[in-house]
Amino acid sequence: MTRITLLEGTPVLRLTRLVTTAAAGALVAALGAAPQAGAASATFYDPPADLPAGQGAIVRTEPMKLALTLRGLYLPGNATRIMYTSTDEAGEPAAVSGAYIEPTKKWRGTGPRPLVAVAAGTQGQGDACAPSKTLENFLNVEGDEFGIGYEIPSIYDFLNRGIAVVLTDYIGLGTTDRVHTYTNRLDMGHALLDAARAALKLPNTSISQSSPVGLYGYSQGGGAAGSAAELAPSYAPELNLKGAYAGAPPANLAEVLKSADGTDLTGVIAYAINGITPYHPELQSALDTLATAEGKAALEKVKTQCIGGTLFSYGFQKTKKWTTTGQSLYDILKTNPELRAPVDAQRIGRLKPAVPVQVLTGTKDDIVDHAQAKQLAKDWCDQGANITYTPVIQIIPTAGTALNHLTPMITRLGATHDWLQDRLEGKSVRSNCGSLRLLP
């Protein structure tokens, strides 16, 4: 039996464990999936020493199955595991894994079959959490860690509309050569755009270079989709991009370090630090003196964790326990321009998307602060972009449990897919930038 190590914590954490375990078990029983070890070829996620030239070039592929298909019903698509090339923040080539799914349903909209590049929400930093693995198994167990495929309902809805999907694992998530660069603006945006490029190069699919392309993501995925949307004009101008959806985007990482601190997702702050440090040695030097032994241990431990394990290890802790000064990481950044600069470099909103973008955010989001997501919409509006700002009105705070953060991802799934499908069909949309400042 696989052992999953859980640390004792607050009553809220113990309740969260029970709810998570029960919900996962019920879903598995209802949909006929079973937790299992990764089924990919043993070496598939090991990048070769030499990568093919170009961005979005295919490194390797293999067939894969899909998880969570209802008993007795047809599969929504035929899946292919992929490895492709991208470019990291340092401008170096990187191998990225992911999956392409060819729908079994016909596309009944106007024009050629479209493609949506999906950026998953926070999975974790360990390779067990790779979205392509949980797309295959739903519960992917590797050693002490398990990844959960909570993006599957969204992906399957696109497939059931006849829309092809390509899913990125991001740089370093799944592939064994480096640590996942969580919330790194350039790494995420490049990986998502190059996933679309790779999908269009696959043989024997129903998509082509003329296929309209959409970008879709929530939370970490919202940041990736937002970054990709504004990078596309310069990084991937050849894509027939038609629109992007950025849900709960962590557009201002410094503000997210503040809003996530002391919540059940405090550990994602450690993910973010690990995602920036490889490109900024000055941060590593600062951590050597500013981080306590406990803080250094947290940074190291999360590198192999999925979000469930990180929640159990660091939920509702405060980052001031990780610093030798007793200050939160946000407070340290606020007073240290040299350390803040690499974090500020992750800011999304300084470039103009060339396609319509919907920015959706809960007004009392307890993890990714609403104000910084709204500011992203304003920043793009100020540059003349076509923005649909969609605030989800929330009345009751949820005290750092992530309920207000996660609920809009579920309740607005159909509406956001409708919005993006309209863009893929070439339907126009009027920006609501004019009324943005009047909205909550």
Image: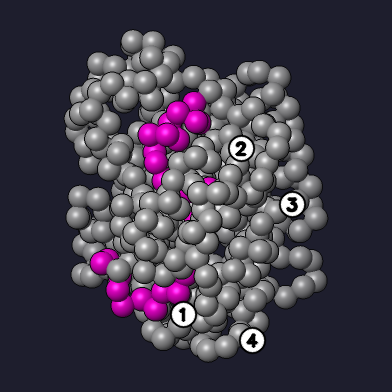
| 257 part of magenta stretch | yes
Q: Residue at x 76, y 65 (%)?
A: 70
Q: Nearer the viewer, mark 2 or mark 1?
A: 2
Q: Position of residue 20 (x, y in %)?
A: 70, 38
Element type at mark 3 = helix
For marks 4 and 3 on the same chain, the one whose residue lies earlier in the sequence: 3
**Nearer the viewer's eye, disc 4 or disc 3?**
4
Q: Nearer the viewer, mark 3 or mark 2?
A: 2
Residues at marks 1 and 4, CA–CA distance in whole angstroms: 14 Å
Q: Which residue is mark 2?
A: 364
| Dot label at residue 212 | 1
**Residue closest to the eye, 229 or 138:** 229
The first of marks 3 and 2 along the sequence is 3
Q: Which residues are magenta?
A: 234-261
Q: Which residue is mark 3?
A: 28
Q: Is residue 79 visible?
A: no
Q: Amino acid at mark 1?
A: Pro
Q: Which residue is mark 4?
A: 108
Quadrant assignment for the C terminus: top right
The three-letter code of the residue at mark 2 reads Lys
Picture quadrant of residue 146: top right
Mark 4 or 2: the one toward you: 2
Q: Residues within 10 Å of mark 2 (few under 14, many from 20)?
A: many
Residue at position x 31%, y 25% from top?
333
Give amino acid for label 3: Val
Crowdedness near tag 1: few (<14), some (14–19) or many (≥20) residues, C-alpha within 10 Å: many
